[in-house]
């Protein structure tokens, strides 16, 4: 038998006359409930999960309203308002670069 010195022998090394006796009671412990009577629904259960740090909330980019004036272009409006032509086009559903005076644009910030 290969075994390091010390420690207790494994169960297959012990003879049946050396096994400890296990007391079997006819009665279950006082605080246990038979499986047949356990309720599977509960109305008072609540689970709360907390984390060490809350996840950072990304702020939505702010936008400004701009009324197009005669002589304006998307690039001039974008550069004056800290945005890009493509961002203005996306925010307003514009396909090309044609704009008209008097129209109100939503200008997203970078």
Image (cartoon, rainbow, N blue to C red):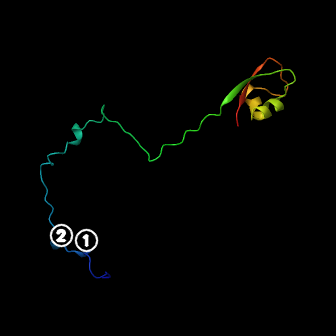
Q: Position of residue 64 (x, y in %)?
A: 70, 27
Residue situated furthest top in the rendering: 102
Q: Position of residue 56 (x, y in %)?
A: 54, 42
Crowd around label 1: few <14 · some 14–19 · many ≥20 (10 Å) = few
Quadrant hosting residue 8: bottom left
Judging depth in this view, the residue of 89 and 19 nearest the camera is: 89
Residue situated furthest front in the rendering: 80
Q: Quadrant of the C terminus?
A: top right
User: Vertically, is 19 above or below 45?
Assistant: below
Quadrant hosting residue 48: top left
Q: Residue at x 13, y 59 (%)?
A: 23
Q: Position of residue 2 (x, y in %)?
A: 32, 82
Disc number for residue 11: 1
Disc number for residue 19: 2
Q: Quadrant of the N terminus?
A: bottom left
Residues at badges 1 and 2 in contact (C-beta under 8 Å)?
A: yes
Q: Is residue 92 left or right of residue 54?
A: right
Q: Residue at x 41, y 43 (%)?
A: 50
Q: Residue at x 70, y 34 (%)?
A: 109
User: Vertically, is 109 above or below 68?
Assistant: below
Judging depth in this view, the residue of 9 and 82 nearest the camera is: 82
| Secondary structure beneath label 1 | helix
Q: Is residue 37 visible?
A: yes
Judging depth in this view, the residue of 12 and 106 nearest the camera is: 106
Crowd around label 2: few <14 · some 14–19 · many ≥20 (10 Å) = few
Q: Is residue 85 visible?
A: no
The Cα atoms of the two marked residues, 1 and 2, are separated by 8 Å
Tell me which label, 1 or 2, sits earlier in the chain.
Answer: 1
Q: Position of residue 81 (x, y in %)?
A: 75, 32
Q: Residue at x 26, y 73 (%)?
A: 12
Residue situated furthest right in the rendering: 71
């Amino acid at each position: 038998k290969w075994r390091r010195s010390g420690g207790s022998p494994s169960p297959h090394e012990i003879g049946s006359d050396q096994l400890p006796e296990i007391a079997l009671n006819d009665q279950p412990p006082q605080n246990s409930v038979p499986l047949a009577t356990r309720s599977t629904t509960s109305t008072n259960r609540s689970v709360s999960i907390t984390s060490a740090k809350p996840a950072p909330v990304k702020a939505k980019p702010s936008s400004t309203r701009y009324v197009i004036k005669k002589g304006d272009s998307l690039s001039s409006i974008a550069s004056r308002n800290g945005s890009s032509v493509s961002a203005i086009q996306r925010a307003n559903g514009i396909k090309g670069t044609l704009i008209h005076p008097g129209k109100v644009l939503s200008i997203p910030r970078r």
